[in-house]
Amino acid sequence: MSSSVGAPQQHNQPSRKGKKAWRKNVDVSEIQKGLEDAREEVTKGHPSDTLFTVDTTGSDTIRKSHKTSKPLKVDEILAARSAVPAISTHKRLGVTDGIIEPSSKRRKGNGVSPREYDRLKGIAYGGESVRKDVVQTDDTPSHDPWALDSARTSEQDPQLSYLENRKPTKAPTTLKKPPISLLANASSLPAVPKPKPGISYNPVFQDWDALLTSAGAAEVAAERKRLAEAAAEEEKQRLIAAAQNERENEEYKTEDESAWEGFESESGVAEWLKKRRPERKTPAERNKVKRRKEAERQAKWEAQMKKREKQARQVESIAKQVEREAKARASAMNSVAAKKDSGDSDEETFHNEVLRRRKFGKHNLPSPPLELVLPDELRDSLRLLKPEGNALGDRFRNIMLRGKIETRRPISQPKKKRRTMTEKWTYKDFRVPGEV
């Protein structure tokens, strides 16, 4: 076997036709010997220093051939240096902007006169254009939108002298009156009412139980009302269907069938022919009616006179009763005022809403959200507490309840602008080239 490295020699190959003949009688003794030597080295073992080397420096050729990352554009700009020198920040004395002022004027620390400083300050902060929009802090308004502009009314075109002068805009009378609350038994409500103690994230058990009981009773009453309305509507539909079926059965009955049963149908007879004509009254009947009306009038007059005499005899008792009612009314007003000062009456009225019949707006007031935490939703940690409620929605509903604005509801499907489609006929206005 030669010592040169090459393909394995093939011995005793009688034929070399085809790939199968090439693969036969191949000498692999050198490969087998190499595998056995490697297996013996693994089994005998060798120290790691003879088998491996640790490279701590790296290859210079690989480092040069490896592409480094491109620096950022910002770093390139900051690294670049301009040939123009930077402006000096030191203050130079004797250098002005071309305007030489007398030395007698007092200047600011930065070399600007007070007049120039005020002018620059006015330009920077808006000057008079901003000062006129400042709202006064006292009670007197700076502008009355309902006041008549004298300059505008005095100026009139002499060619339009035959026209009447424009009438001034008058403020509505309700502008000076306070808004009327939608509650039936409350004159004014606080802008931000105190919430119920039972809706706290960690409420007292008595307050929470009372709120839960009242909310449950309200839901039960609402469900009963809904079921009653559903039953009434179902009964109404049943009666309508029965009447319609009866009408259809009567229509199917023909004239011959009704005559066969022994009577003629009166469906064709007019309704006014069935009515009985009023008979003419005799003089005796007229006199009888006149006497009856006179007796009723006399009895009514006598009862009224008896009532007046009784009231005349009871003048003193009526006066005492009126005085008692006045005292009771005054005491009730005082108690209401005291409760209003303490804030308990309005809060209680707000929580127990009883709306008045006449509403402000064409929509009903939206019902308040159910602010109640169920037993399985109570949490003993602020981390597990879920935020509930909407301050904007509560504020908006409170404004409607206080009568500041009319009742409204969100528009789910706004009205779209109506568009009319027309077909233009300009495509028919054409001329053939070469013709007049």
Image (cartoon, rainbow, N blue to C red):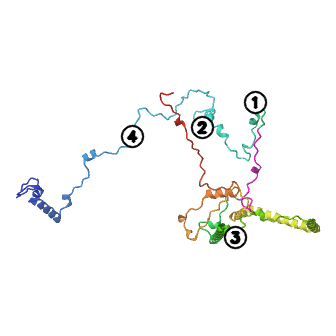
Q: Give the amino acid type for the residue marked by disc 2 in the picture.
A: Ala
User: Does residue 218 show up?
Assistant: no
Split into 4 quadrants, where in the image is the N terminus?
Answer: bottom left
Q: Secondary structure at mark 2?
A: helix
According to the picture, the residue beneath numbered tag 2 turns out to be 124
Along the polypeptide, which appears first: circle 2 or circle 3? 2
Task: Please state the extent of the stretch shown in magenta in the rendering.
Answer: 166-189
Residue 391, x across and y down, in percent? 61, 58
Real-space Cα distance between discs 2 and 1? 46 Å
151 or 272: nearer the viewer: 272
Residue underneath mark 3: 259
Q: From the viewer's perspective, is the residue at label 1 or at label 4 nearer?
A: 1
Q: Nearer the viewer, mark 3 or mark 1?
A: 3
CA distance for labels 3 and 1:
89 Å
Q: Is residue 160 above or below residue 201?
A: above
Residue type at numbered disc 4: Glu
**Residue marked by disc 4:** 76
Badge 3 marks a residue whose secondary structure is helix
Does residue 53 appear anywhere in the picture?
A: yes
Q: Nearer the viewer, mark 2 or mark 1?
A: 1
